[in-house]
Structures are given as structure tokens and as C-alpha cells.
Amino acid sequence: MSIKAAVDGRIDVTLCEVAETDIARILEGYALLQQALGCDAVEDLDSFLGTVSSSTDAAVAPKIVRATRDDEIVGVIIGQYLRNLNMGFIAYSGVRVAWRRRGIYAAMRREIIDLFNWEAAREVSQKHSRSVDYVLSELDEDGWLYQTYLDVWNGIALPCDYEQPGAQGLQAKPLRLVLQPVGQRKPPTHSQIAAIVRELYERVYRIEDVDTNPSYQRIVASLSNFSIRATDRQFLSNTNSANKRRKI
Ligand SMILES: CC(C)(COP(=O)(O)OP(=O)(O)OC[C@H]1O[C@@H](n2cnc3c(N)ncnc32)[C@H](O)[C@@H]1OP(=O)(O)O)[C@@H](O)C(=O)NCCC(=O)NCCS
């Protein structure tokens, strides 16, 4: 378990990885997410307990980070390291209203990416590097968080009409699938994007027959409407501005 104080000059909270056996803290996190996101946006409790358990699927390593102040939970982020892709997926996050806009989400996000990278380092092989290639998030195109990912965190919206599938008590809905480069400097090709979506559907949403899933079929069909060149340009421009920022 990793414990550390988040220090960016504005916050004084403790970030802590939650063990998957710590059911009391997991339930606290679940309640916070339901409050922050609304019950319709969070999967059923049974399904959620499967999502945070490493015994659900050997190809997935779940990660939970919570932020506390005086042992009271103020924020939580849930993610999954996807071994077959060497990518992290951010599934849920929430910060209590009174604690927002103090950098807590940004700090939890950094922490969970460190945990994804730690898993990636354990997997090192000819295929994988020491960090994840990308971190994936599903975001609402109309929300400020989507814009923050693109403008501040070098995110790239993948060129497809992505849909979160109807599964685990959630309704199917159109979202953008955003990829944040970590170890990988090249954008994915159309066939890699289809493979990413397949893995999310199979491993994260636990859909058994992905090929016959209508949302999956629509996403794959939509790929041909997008030019991969536009993504290449976006990727290059984001990578260049990230490099410039690093030099400053
Ligand atoms: C999304 C959420 C987790 C962000 O938590 P937070 O701790 O307030 O976020 P941070 O303070 O780390 O903000 C990081 C950056 O995001 C942007 N941001 C945060 N809140 C914003 C807002 N209300 N409007 C516009 N930009 C905002 C800013 O760029 C901010 O950096 P800055 O403060 O240095 O400018 C929180 O608002 C929340 O719980 N919302 C409801 C649940 C949700 O939407 N979860 C995400 C989808 S799973």
C-alpha cells in the first residue's frame, strides 16, 4: 500500500492505495461515487465489487486510490491496468463538492498512473515497456473535464463514434474515448483502436460476445468515417507542446 501526502501548495490531504480486501473503504468509495456522479452513472454494487477484484479477470489489475482528510474520505479514483494492451483505464472518479478545485483529482490521477506504471514494470517483456503506453478515459464531449484532458493533459480523442456499452446496469451512451500518451509516442492505427475498444468491452464491461454487440459494431463501422491523419497531426502537436512544457 502506498501512502503519501498530496502537495501542490493548495491541498493537504493524504492519498492512499486501497487494498481490494478492504471492503469497508471500497464501500465508502462506492457511496462517494454514487453521490458525485449520480446512481445512474455507477454500475450495480455486485458488478462494482467484481470491477475492483483482481480475481475477476487475470488480464486486469484493478487500482483504487482514495484521498482523505483526518481519515474522512474526500475523493476516490478507480482504474484498471489492462495487461493485454499495456494501458491504464480510468473507470470512475469523484471528489466531494466542498473539496473540489483544490487539485485533488489531478493528484489522485497522477497517483493511479504511477500504480499503472508499477504494474507495467512488472510485466516488462519484449512487447511492453516500463510504463503504460496510454491511459484511457471515457468522457462527455460537452463537459469541462473533456476539454481539460485535451488542453492540459495532452489527451487525444480517438477518431471513432465511441459508445459506453449498455452493461452492468448502465445504459449505452455516446462518449468520447480519450487517450493520454504515457510511454508510447505514436498514435494508434484504426485496427489498434478497434482492439482497444474490444478489450474495454471484454475486460472492463465483461461483455461475452463483443462481435455481436450493437455498440461495438457501430464503433468499428464509424472508424472509416475518420481520417487517421487528423489524429496523427493532433498527436504530433500535443507531443510537441508537452515537450516544450517539459523544457520550461
Ligand atoms: C471531476 C472531479 C473529480 C474533479 O475533481 P477536482 O479535485 O475538483 O479537480 P482538480 O481540482 O484536480 O482540477 C484539475 C483541473 O481540472 C479543471 N477543472 C476542475 N474543476 C473545473 C471546473 N468546475 N470547471 C472547469 N475546469 C475545472 C482545471 O483545469 C483544474 O486545474 P486548475 O484548478 O489548476 O485550473 C469533480 O469535479 C467531481 O467529482 N465531479 C463529479 C464527478 C465526475 O464528473 N467525475 C468525472 C467523471 S468519472
Image: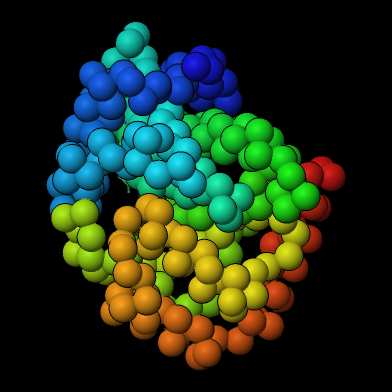
Counting from the top left corner in percent of width and height, residue 211 is at 37, 76
Identified at 48% across, 78% down, the residue is: 160
Quadrant showing the C terminus: top right
Q: Which of 104 and 216 lies nearest the eye of the viewer?
A: 216
Identified at 46% across, 42% down, the residue is: 58
Residue 155 lies, with reference to residue 198, above or below; the image says above
Q: Which of 7 and 207 lies nearest the eye of the viewer?
A: 207
- Is 123 placed left or right of 68 in the picture? right
Identified at 57% across, 21% down, the residue is: 7
Name the image quarter holding residue 117: top right
Residue 233 lies, with reference to residue 57, above or below; the image says below
Residue 30 appears in the picture as rendered: yes
Counting from the top left corner in percent of width and height, residue 37 is at 24, 46
Kindly give the residue lying farthest to the right in the view shown: 247
Residue 106 appears in the picture as rendered: no
Residue 203 lies, with reference to residue 52, above or below; the image says below
Question: In which of the image's four quarters is ligand 1 placed?
Answer: top left
Q: How is the image coloured?
A: rainbow
Name the image quarter holding residue 238: bottom right
Counting from the top left corner in percent of width and height, residue 145 is at 43, 54
